[in-house]
Image: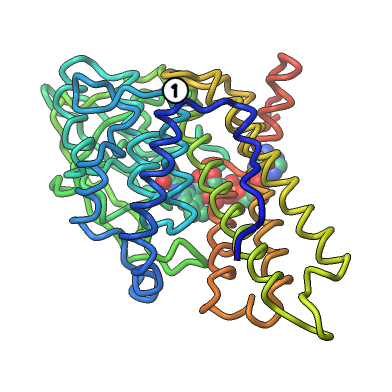
Amino acid sequence: MTTGSTWTAESAFDLSDEQRDLKEMTARLARERHAPNVAEWERQRSSLPDDERLRLGEVGLLGICLPEEYGGGGRPLLDGLIAIEELGKVSMQGAMPVFEAATGPARVIDLLGTEEQRARILPPVARGEKTIAVSISEPDAGSAATDMSTRARIDGDEIVINGAKRWCTGAGHSEQYLVYCRMGDELGAAGIGAVLVDRDTPGLSFGPREIQMGWAGVHHADMFFDDARVPIENLIIEKGGFKQLFTVFSIERLGNSTCSLALAQAALDRTAAYVQERRQFGKEIIEFQTMQTQLADMLVQVEAARLLIYRAARHAGTGTPVPIEASVAKCFANETSKRVTDLAIQMHGGYGFSAEYEVERLHRDSHGWAIAGGTPTMQRMRIASEYLGRRFDQRS
Ligand SMILES: Cc1cc2nc3c(=O)[nH]c(=O)nc-3n(C[C@H](O)[C@H](O)[C@H](O)COP(=O)(O)OP(=O)(O)OC[C@H]3O[C@@H](n4cnc5c(N)ncnc54)[C@H](O)[C@@H]3O)c2cc1C
């Protein structure tokens, strides 16, 4: 059953032929290689198999936004987001590696690392041999990230790390971690820098895998640093660079927004088909006016989220978004995704509650994106602060 229309807000952005081809190619790959396996991956709580991750590298999706000289495609952020959406509509397993490589910590290395670090670290990411996760949150430092207490001290040609991290997406599974640490005695943001740590570094250990509401294929676990030593070459940002780190983090916020958008769009697509198939009282349920208005509400929110994301991505080009635009997009897309996927369950009736129809998975996963990368509440604070040009101290 088709929706009867191919209209979408992306038409307002005049995608290039290259971007349309990318969208089509990615959608086909997700449909053919991921869709048949999603239910099993979910049951097994498994991430994307290694051979499929390598394939994403081969077709250029992992390196899409990384520089060409390091094996990437050198394409704008919007292209990365187009790919993430197409993969995310089918599975979080497929979207996650591209989310990490095109919008996650690899972009920090790309934009803030040295020439030597880019040349060493980025090519394996673009090929799909290594994933880099980001490790900021701690048991006592979530929204208040600058309260982090994990310490990194320079000792000759090594950095020694001590502390504990929590909720890192990919913990125990990713090959490398960009770990935000306190690198001096300065309080708050001033003492924070970032170090790249290999998974098999002596002194780094992982707690048991977390059981969570959604993101079944994604590994989360506590990370413990006990005199973990890494070479000084892995110092990515020295203390004092927190503002730079968080400016680049706006890229990840748009990747996050796009995963929310993908879930909402998938819920809309599935619901549009379902309400034209399901019959009650002798007619298709879409013939009831309430169903029409609910479907329209879903569409309005999905399209508005896409416009906000595309605007921020367009302005970012191959660099970083304007922070307020990224926060506005994230706040709206996260909440849209939760609302739209919830409506999808309701409009599917009992089938919406069944795992077989998968809309319940979309809803569960949407909650994760609305916490990761800073909650919508914290985005609202950032939005008010940027809009007014004022800083609001949350502590006093
Ligand atoms: C699926 C998932 C993936 C994640 N991935 C990563 C990752 O890869 N790397 C990483 O480092 N972290 C990751 N996180 C952690 C995430 O960034 C934090 O969970 C998030 O920032 C919130 O922190 P918290 O859980 O400690 O909640 P808290 O900060 O304790 O917040 C609890 C509630 O209080 C509200 N609140 C807090 N401060 C204020 C305030 N000043 N004013 C008003 N309300 C406030 C919050 O909005 C929230 O509703 C992930 C989390 C999830 C769920």
Under circle 1, the secondary element is helix
Q: Nearer the viewer, residue 105 or 202?
A: 105
* 260 up-or-down from 179: above or below: below
Left or right of 51? Residue 385 is right
Q: Position of residue 61 (x, y in %)?
A: 31, 39
Identified at 37% across, 52% down, the residue is: 28
> Please, which residue is most extreme toward the front here?
4
Q: Residues within 10 Å of mark 1 (few under 14, many from 20)?
A: many
Identified at 61% across, 38% down, the residue is: 330
> Please, which residue is most extreme toward the right here?
289
Q: Position of residue 150 (x, y in %)?
A: 36, 39
Left or right of 142? Residue 170 is left
Q: Position of residue 223 (x, y in %)?
A: 31, 52
Asked if ligand 1 lies within 8 A of label 1, the reply is no
> What is the quadrant of residue 158 in the picture?
top left
**Quarter that holds the C terminus:** top right
**Quarter that holds the N terminus:** bottom right
Identified at 36% across, 34% down, the residue is: 102
Q: Nearer the viewer, residue 6 or 117?
A: 6
**Residue of label 1:** 242
Q: How is the image coloured?
A: rainbow
Left or right of 133? Residue 293 is right
Q: Nearer the viewer, residue 120 or 224?
A: 120
> Please, which residue is most extreme toward the bottom here?
281
Q: Position of residue 65 (x, y in %)?
A: 35, 28
What's under tag 1, amino acid-wise? Phe
Q: Nearer the viewer, residue 203 or 171?
A: 171
* 179 up-or-down from 237: above or below: below
Is residue 142 something that shows in the picture? no
